[in-house]
Amino acid sequence: GHPHFGDHAPAQGISVDLLHGASAAAAGGPSRAKPRVRRFTLTAQPATVRLASGPIDAWSFNGQVPGPVLRVRQGDLVEVTLRNRLPGQSVTVHWHGYDVPSGEDGVPGVTQNAVAPGQTHVYRFRAEDAGTYWYHSHQNSSVAVPRGLFGLLVVDPAAPLPESEDHVLALHTFGTRPTLSVDGAAPVEGLARLALPPGARTRLRVVNTDTRPVVLGLGGAPYRIAAVDGGDVPGATDLDGDRLHLAAGGRYDLTFTVPSGPVLLTAGDRPALLVNGPATPPAAAGPIVDITRYGAATAPPARFDQEVTWVLDKTLAMADGLPRLAQTVNGKAWPNIPTPVVRQGQTVRIRVVNRGTDTHPMHPHGHHVRILSRNGVPATGLAMDTFDVAPGEVWEVALVADNPGMWMSHCHDLAHAAQGMEFHLAYE
Ligand code: C2O
Ligand code: CU
């Protein structure tokens, strides 16, 4: 789950017995009683995505890109049957940012075998952490995710949110064609539109499903970043015309009150979503918020049980007698990067140093990390699961080892992962 310092109770430590409701009361805690089971089927299959500029041969879940929005309530048991009907391509489902038990993490070769064409696999986890997440295949992911094997996952909190309008947006680029999908509908290549009642408190859950970061702008209304990577931001302050840097794989929940005039969301300086047109407000052009310093500061952990450093770089390595670009961690590429080993309950400080010339959205599975500092400047301590380390930057983050298992950690520029920037994180 999200890190809770000073509280090292194992999160997500659910067993199959509990999943089937056996002795729920005996397990203690009201949240263990009679969970509602939500069942979904995701069928990986070819699909044609029709964009204004022409069709795309996509890979999809259930014939649609993005796949269906899986929207559940905190406390639900989620059971997802994956069926593979994709000729010649194995698949899995990884729950990006949702810290499931290790066995449900959907990483082929680590937590399961890839699901071959014609086969099925069932995932089960309990939705304890409210927030905005997404899912995608983790097999051949540098090809499969850009091609469409992804969808959105929203866990609604047990107590209702103050926003009466709540919409989830996927920003995705097919080849060179950027699109926006609203609430899982077919992606729109030009300007997507949304009509909202003036005065309505609104939450836009923005998910970057691309392998590159995007600069977002919200013009026409003051807004807040209510949540980052699924977790609420304590003390979120008003922004007006400020722009945001959203890492590949990252999510921001933006909240605002619908004004009498229009609101415009831009993505990479492209108008992406117009709320209550036809007039278009000026695009946000303010400074880019430093997300590491946003919100109210929370106390950092009092001590660290272990210190780890990841130096990110790239090099030419010989492969099959030819020089090939390798993206490296501590000078090594997959599968030669040493596996960091943690013990349950430890708090680990990770120093991430980018000595290369590319931005690396680092994504440890199964855990959120608290951002401690960026380039030596103390951070407010937000929990993130995908944080973007630019060339020359040094980030310090804290990982609480509260989710035992064998985990993947990698750069979410998925081409970089395929070029070697991925490694395991193990529990002893
Ligand atoms: Cu979004 Cu290892 O993945
Ligand atoms: Cu990278």
Image (spheres, helix red, strand yellow):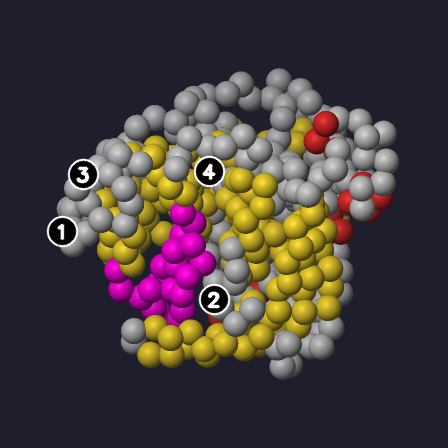
Q: What label does residue 64 carry, if any?
A: none
Does the residue at mark 4 contact the one at mark 1 (Cβ under 8 Å)?
Answer: no
Q: What label does residue 228 carry, if any?
A: 4
- The percent position of residue 423, horizontal first and vertical second, equals 66, 53
Residue at the location (73% across, 64% down)?
121
Q: What label does residue 279 carry, if any?
A: 1
Does the residue at mark 2 contact the one at mark 4 (Cβ under 8 Å)?
Answer: no
Q: Earlier in the sequence, mark 3 or mark 2?
A: 2
Q: Is residue 111 above or below residue 392?
A: below
Residue 80 is covered by the magenta coloring: no
Q: Around disc 4, counting alpha carbons within 10 Å, would you say few (fewer than 14), some (14 to 19), or many (20 or more)?
A: many
In the image, what residue type sits under mark 4? Val
Mark 2 and mark 4: Cα distance apart in space: 24 Å
Could you say whether the residue bearing mark 2 is in a helix, strand or loop? loop
Q: Give the magenta-colored segment's residue range.
A: 167-191
Relative to 143, is 41 on the left or the right? Answer: right
Query: Nearer the observer, disc 3 or disc 2?
Result: 3
Q: Nearer the viewer, residue 382 or 126?
A: 126
Q: Earlier in the sequence, mark 1 or mark 3?
A: 3
Mark 1 and mark 3: Cα distance apart in space: 12 Å
Mark 2 and mark 1: Cα distance apart in space: 29 Å
Q: Earlier in the sequence, mark 4 or mark 3?
A: 4
Mark 3 and mark 2: Cα distance apart in space: 33 Å
Give the residue number, with chain letter if any, for mark 2: 65
- On-image quarter of the C terminus: top right
Q: Nearer the viewer, residue 424 or 272?
A: 272
Query: Nearer the observer, disc 4 or disc 3?
Result: 3
Query: Nearer the observer, disc 4 or disc 1?
Result: 1
Relative to 285, is 418 on the left or the right? Answer: right
Residue at the location (75% across, 33% down)?
33
Q: Around disc 3, counting alpha carbons within 10 Å, would you say few (fewer than 14), some (14 to 19), or many (20 or more)?
A: few
Give the residue number, with chain letter if any, for mark 3: 260
